[in-house]
Amino acid sequence: MNAILSGTLNLIIYFVIAVVIAFGCRILFTIPDEIFRKALHFILLGSFLVLLVSYPTWQITAIAAIIFEVLVYPILKIAERIKQYSSFTTERKKGELKASLMLVYTMFAIVVTVCWGFFDDKYLALASLYAWGIGDAFAALIGKKYGKHKIHAPGLDGRKSYEGTFSMFFISFTTVFIILMWRGGLNIVACILTALIVGFVSAISELYSKNGNDTVICPISAMLTLLPLVYVFGGLK
C-alpha cells in the first residue's frame, strides 16, 4: 500500500510541477501554439517514465494508469466550462485534450501489460511508447515548419510531407537505438537493425494515421515490430 501511495504521489507531484511550469511560461511568454501543444505532449510522455519507476509491479502500474485517467477525466470535463480553456490549451476541437489523455493512458496500460507483464521488460515498453511519442512530436514540428514537399499517394490526403515523415523515422530510430543500447542484451548491429525497422514502421504508421488515431496505431505497431525483432536477435529472456 505504501508503494502505491508513494507512486501516486510521485505522479501527482510530477504533473503539478510540469503543468505549473508549462502554463506559467504560456502566460509570461509568447509561445507558438504548436510548440505549446508539443510541450503538453512531452509532459504526457514524461509521465510514462514516472509510472514505470514509481510502482513495484506491472499490475499496479497498469491499474494506476487506468485509475489516473478515470480521476482526471471529470476534472478536465469541468475545466472545459472555462471560456478560454480551449484557446489557452491550444485545442483544435473541444474535448481534444481530454480525449488525448484517455487514449494515451490506455495505451500506457496496454504497453505495460504486454512488455512488462508478459516479457518482464520495462525498457521495451519505454521503446514502444517513445518510438511513437518523441518521433511524432518532431514530425509535427518539422513537418509544419519545413514540410514543403507533400506526399501524394493512395490513402493520403497530401497534407503530410517527406520532411515530417523522415523526421518521424529518424527520431524514432534514434530513440529506439538509445533505449536498446541502454537496456543491453543485444549487440550494436542488432540494436541498429532493430531500431531501423521499428523507425520505418513507426514512420509509415504515422504517415497513414488520421484523426489522431496515431496515438493507438503507432505504439502498437512499434511494439508488435520491436518484440519479435528483439526475440529473433536473442534479446528476450
Image (cartoon, rainbow, N blue to C red):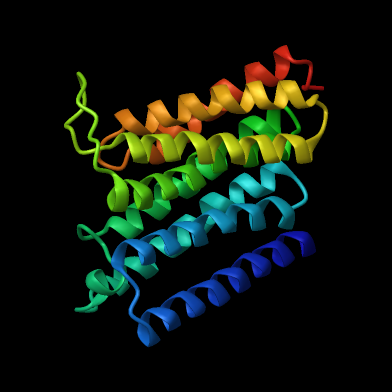
37 lies above or below 103:
below
* 101 sits to left or right of 9: left
Residue 199 drawn at (x, y percent): 52, 30
The image quadrant that residue 73 belongs to is bottom left
Front-lying residue, 64 or 38: 38
Residue 103 drawn at (x, y percent): 41, 46
Q: In this orientation, does residue 112 appear?
A: no
Q: Quadrant of the N terminus?
A: bottom right
Query: How many numbered marks appear?
Result: 0
- Residue at the left extreme, as displayed: 157
- Residue at the top extreme, as displayed: 232
Q: In which quarter of the image is the C terminus?
A: top right
The image quadrant that residue 35 belongs to is bottom left
Front-lying residue, 61 or 151: 151
Residue 175 drawn at (x, y percent): 60, 41
At x 53%, y 55%, the residue is 67
- Residue at the bottom extreme, as displayed: 28
Q: In this orientation, does residue 59 appear?
A: yes
At x 39%, y 44%, the residue is 139
At x 48%, y 74%, the residue is 19
Front-lying residue, 119 or 129: 129
97 lies above or below 136:
below
Residue 113 drawn at (x, y percent): 62, 35
At x 37%, y 83%, the residue is 29
* 177 sits to left or right of 25: right
Front-lying residue, 55 or 165: 165
166 lies above or below 72:
above
